[in-house]
Image: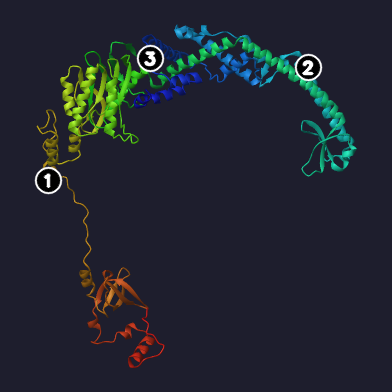
Amino acid sequence: MNQIEKSLEFDKIKAIWAELALTDYAKERIIGITPYLSEGELLMGLRETTQAKKLIEAWGSPPLVSLKNVHGLTAAAEKGDCLSPLQLEEIRGALVAVKRIRQYLTRCRQDHLALAYYDENFYCLEEVEETIGLWIRGGRVEDDASKLLKSLREDIEKKERQMREKADSAIRAGKEWMSDSFSTYRSGHLCIPVKKEYKFRIKGSVIDQSATGNTLFMEPEAVARVHSELELVRLEEENEERRILYSLTAMVADHSQEIQQNIRMIEKLDFIFSKGKLSLEYGGTEPKINTERRLVIKEGRHPLIDKTICVPLSLEMGEKIRGIVITGPNTGGKTVAIKTVALNAMMAQCGLHVACREADICMNGEFLCDIGDGQNLSENLSTFSAHIANVLGILKEAGRESLVIMDELGSGTDPAEGMGIAIAILEELKKSGALFLVTTHYPEVKTYAQKEKAMINARMTFDRESLKPLYQLVCGEAGESCALYIAKKLGMPREMLETAVKAAYKDGIPEGMELLGRDSLEEEKSGIRKSSGKIQKQRPMAKRQDAAGRFNRGDSVMVYPDKKLGIVCETANEKGVLRIQMPGRKIWVNHKRVKLQVKAEEMYPEDYDFSIIFDTVKNRKLRHQMERKHVEGQELREDT
């Protein structure tokens, strides 16, 4: 059931529902709830939900509290344990909550609803609640809980004052021996701060010392005598407090059964009112319940979808119609539709209101569903294998009292074989006698459902102009996936559409499919292809070198993008890069950035010595020397 609840999203409904409860009992009952199989229990649960909702609407939420630990505290009291002041205050809080809920229900009797008379099931324990309130306050026993306790506490205050007076007197008497002018408590003793060198001047005991060791904290003898008397009084106070606590605990133990009964009633009411709160959350209504296998939903919504945007659906199933085959476009709401039906049916059978304007829902022995991708990698099951395994399990369990929903029947495999499997599944579901809703895209399945007496087709509507699903369920009509229509609206050319139709429908376009209307001449001419970016191929190396080879040494050129004049001093290499003499320097430049201004032959005579332009004076002299003879230790360097 947990997997089915998850598939139908009932687990999310439970999570919201549990948040509306206050007691642990109610929360645990909500999480563990399953559909009722007893008609009487179910009808009673629905009455409770309806009445709780009415009381909340008329009188507001009831004054319920969480009541943690109260069961355990009453059990401890019965065993003879002594409850602490804080624990007794928890008991009192529970009794106060009982009084308030009784007052709430008493006011609600004006509406003459049976739920308001639950106040008669509570025990009136005001005496216990008032006694605890008088004797315990703020986590401690009150002074007035007994005359003896009040007297002892007055003695304690008196002894504490005496101790303080005697300590102050000792400080004043030995002022020069003190390191400070006030007393302090150390290890439960009232001490005075004495300088280490004067410790023998004070009659008393050293209780502690300062971090430096220069100050000793001493309890004077006079203070010690009063402290001893104080400890005896405190012991008497503790005994008297314990006697009072045992007395109150015994009172709780004497009424533990009534207290626990009151707590159980509060927990039960918490569960009931949580159903009413949940109904108000999504605007629920009480459904009719039948055992005749009749399922009628009018304007049903998915309770987790905002009702301002959710499109309601209506359908009817029963003895004549056992199955509905829903078809329509992708993302058209088919899955949401079948989940809406099954989820509302499950909620109704758990005693909850349904998100419908009106509903007549049959009780189901079991809810069976196959929704979503069941791929299981750990068991090496593909999506289709997992789908079929789940479907076969459903078919084994399905019976006359089952409600079955299946999504995308026969999907995940070869279309022809998937269609055959889908029809075989529908045939088995029909034989089982179960009520079932399935979704599919196969046209053959639509045809099969149309011919069968116990089945009908239904379709999800689609806006052909905006290409958006309308999420409306229309029973009695078969839908279409609209894939070809969408493709046409988005500009698929006529030729491609014709090819697609021939492949999909070998016998021609099905009746009613107005798909291949006359396209405009412009659409037919334009086709589907558009001009794409033009690929630019790299020119071969030889061609690049030819382009760069038009520059000769001595040519006057313009260098871009700076637009500066220079003279070619080295022709292009294999990469098409020239060396240009610029004013004061030589640079390497790709030939594409160079434009010829004046050829060298137009500026210089034949056999002109370009070293005059390109070489330094020093290099020219050295070159002439080397041409005549060997020059030891000299090297001709190219000027950069």
> Quick check: marks 1 and 2 in contact, CB under 8 Å?
no
Alpha carbon distance from label 3 to label 1: 66 Å
Q: Can the viewer see residue 356 in this picture?
A: no
Q: Is residue 169 above or below residue 252?
A: below
* Number of residues whose C-alpha sits closer than 10 Å to that of mark 3, classed few (under 14), some (14–19) or many (20 or more): some
Give the residue type at disc 2: Ser
Q: Is residue 277 left or right of residue 405?
A: right
> Quick check: marks 3 and 1 in contact, CB under 8 Å?
no
Tell us which disc is closer to us: 3 or 1. 3
Q: Secondary structure at mark 3?
A: loop
Question: Which numbered circle lies on residue 151?
Answer: 2
* Number of residues whose C-alpha sits closer than 10 Å to that of mark 2, classed few (under 14), some (14–19) or many (20 or more): few
Front position in the image: 591 or 458: 458
Residue 23 screen position, x and y as percent: 51, 20
**Residue under pointer 3:** 36
Q: Earlier in the sequence, mark 3 or mark 1?
A: 3
**Residue under pointer 1:** 525
